[in-house]
Amino acid sequence: MKKSFLYIAASLLLLTGCNLDINENPNYPSSSDVTADLIFPSVENAIADVVGDQMFNYAGFFAQYFEQKPSANQYNDLAELNINESSNLFDRCYRLLYAGALQDVKEIMSRDISEGDAFICTVMRAYAYQLLVDNLDQCPYTEALQGSSNNMPAWDAGKDVYVGVLAEMDAAEAALTDGTKTITLTDPMLNKDIDAWIVFANQLRLRMYMRLYDSGDNSYQDKAIAVAKKLAASGFDDVAWDVYSNAEGQYNPWYDTYFKLTNNHVGASPLIDYMNSMNDPRIGYAFYTTANDESVYEGQIPGSKTLLPNWLGVTSSQVSNYVSHVNYEVMKSAPIYLMTASETYFLLAEVAQRFGASVGITASDAYEEGVAADPKWSSTSDIMAFLNGTGAWSNATDKLDLIYRQKWVALFMVDHMEGWTEARRTDVPELTSLTGKQVFDNEDGYTPGDFIIPVVNYSGGKLAKRVPYPADARSLNSNTPATKLISDPVFWDK
C-alpha cells in the first residue's frame, strides 16, 4: 500500500516546473476532486525527498562523512567548498519545500479536516521550516504562501521562524481532545497513529529547543528538560519514510541518483580515523577496505583530491586504490529518516549530562541506548562489545564530547542533514589546528575525528556553516536578503 502513495506523490511532483514562485502550487491539479487525504502523502514525500536526496548528499560532505572520489570530478565543488548562489545547491530543495510541502499543507488546512489532521499537518509544517532555517537561517514565513496577493514575501529571522512554528505546534496539540484526535488523512509514514505523531512532535521540539538554547536563549533549558521527561516516559521510535525496495524504479532516491548515475563517493578521513581509533565495527557497514591494502580502512583528507598523487607518490589513476570507497548497496532500499530514536536518546543524554537534570533516564543509559539504536549495527554482541570496550561511558573523561561524537557516527548513512547540523551546533567534532597536509603526515596534535579545513578551499579557509540563498529566490523576490557566504553561521550556531 505504501508504494502506491509514493507513486501518487511522485506523479504529482512531475508537474513541478524549473522556475517557480514559492507562492504558486504546481504539485497537484487545481481541482476540488483532489481530496485532502490524497494530498498529505505528497507532503510527507516532498519533505523526505529533500532530506534523503540532495541534502543527504551535500550535508554528507559538510559533515566530513564523504569526499570526492579521486578518479571522478562531479563533487569537487562540495569537497572544496566552491559554492555560491550560482551553484544552485539549494534551489530544488527550496522549491519542494515551499511549492510542494508547505503549499500542500496550506491547501489541506483550507479543507474540512479534523483537529487530528490539522495537528499532523502542523508538525510537518514545523519540520519543513526547521530545515529551511537550518540551511538558510532566514526564510519567508509570516508573509509566505500568500499567492498573487504578495508575491515578494519578507524574509523572517531564523529564531522568529523557530519560535513561530513551535507555537503553532503547541496550539494544534492543545486543540486535541479525546473526541478530536482522529486522523482522516492518508498517512503512509505513521499510519494515522495520533499518539505516534504527538511523540514525533516532542522529538522535534527537543531538537529545536536545544538549538534555541544554544543560540543564547537560556529560557529553553527548562523547556528542553520538560519535553525530555515526556519522551523518557512515553518512549519513542524512528520516524521514517519507508517506501523503498530493491526493485528497479523503487530504490532509495540517493542510491538511485548518486550511485547509479555518479558513483563518486569515498570516505572522509575524520570519520574513518575516528572509527578506526574506536575499533568500531560499524566502519564496515558502508565502507570498503582499500584496494591497495585490504586489511585497512583509509579516509581521504578533505579537499585533498588534486594533491594526493603528489602526496602519495603515485599516478592520478592509482590514487583511488589508497582510500576507502562507499558501499552504496546499503542504501538501495533504505528508508529516509526524519527522526531517529538514536538521535533522541543522544539528546536525552545531553540534557541529563549538560544540565544535571533528572529526566527519567540517566545520561549514561541514554548514551548507551543512543549507540545501540543506530541501525548500522550487525549484531547485539557487537553493540555490547563496543559499549563495554572503546565506547564505554566510563572510559570518557569528557562525557559530552563522547555523546556528540557518537551521535555524529550514528547519523552517518542515516540522516546527514542532522549530522551536519548537530556538528555545527555542538562544535563536535572539534576543528583541528593542523592543516590537512600535517594530518596526512601524521604530525603530533591531531585527535582522530576532528574536522579538518579542506586543503583546497574556496570558503576562505573555513567550514560550511550554511547554504547560499537560492538563485530562484534572488531572481523572483526582491526581499531576498543580501548575499551570505557559506561560512556565515545560522542563528543558533554560536
Image: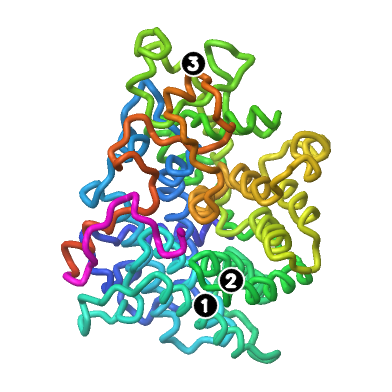
State the residue at coordinates (76%, 67%): 232
Q: Which residue is mark 3?
A: 322
Secondary structure under the numbered disc 3 in the rendered image: helix
In this view, 404 is above or below 28: above
Labelled pair 2, 3 in contact (Cβ < 8 Å): no
Q: Secondary structure at mark 2?
A: helix
In three-dimensional space, the C-alpha distance between marks 2 and 3, rounded to whole angstroms, equals: 43 Å
Determine contact: label 1, label 2, CB under 8 Å. yes
* Viewer-side residue, 468 vs 200: 468
Q: Is residue 90 above or below residue 127?
A: above
Q: Residue at x 57, y 42 (%)?
A: 412
How many angstroms separate mark 1 from mark 2 (CA)? 7 Å
What distance separates the C-alpha of mark 3 from that of mark 1?
Answer: 48 Å
Q: Hey, which quadrant is residue 362 in on the image?
A: bottom right
Residue 98, quarter of the rendered image: bottom left
Q: Earlier in the sequence, mark 2 or mark 3?
A: 2
Q: Which residue is mark 1?
A: 166
Residue 411 position in % (x across, y down): 59, 47
Front position in the image: 37 or 163: 163
Magenta span contains residue 490: yes
Q: Quadrant of residue 35?
A: bottom left
Write down the region rendered in magenta.
478-494
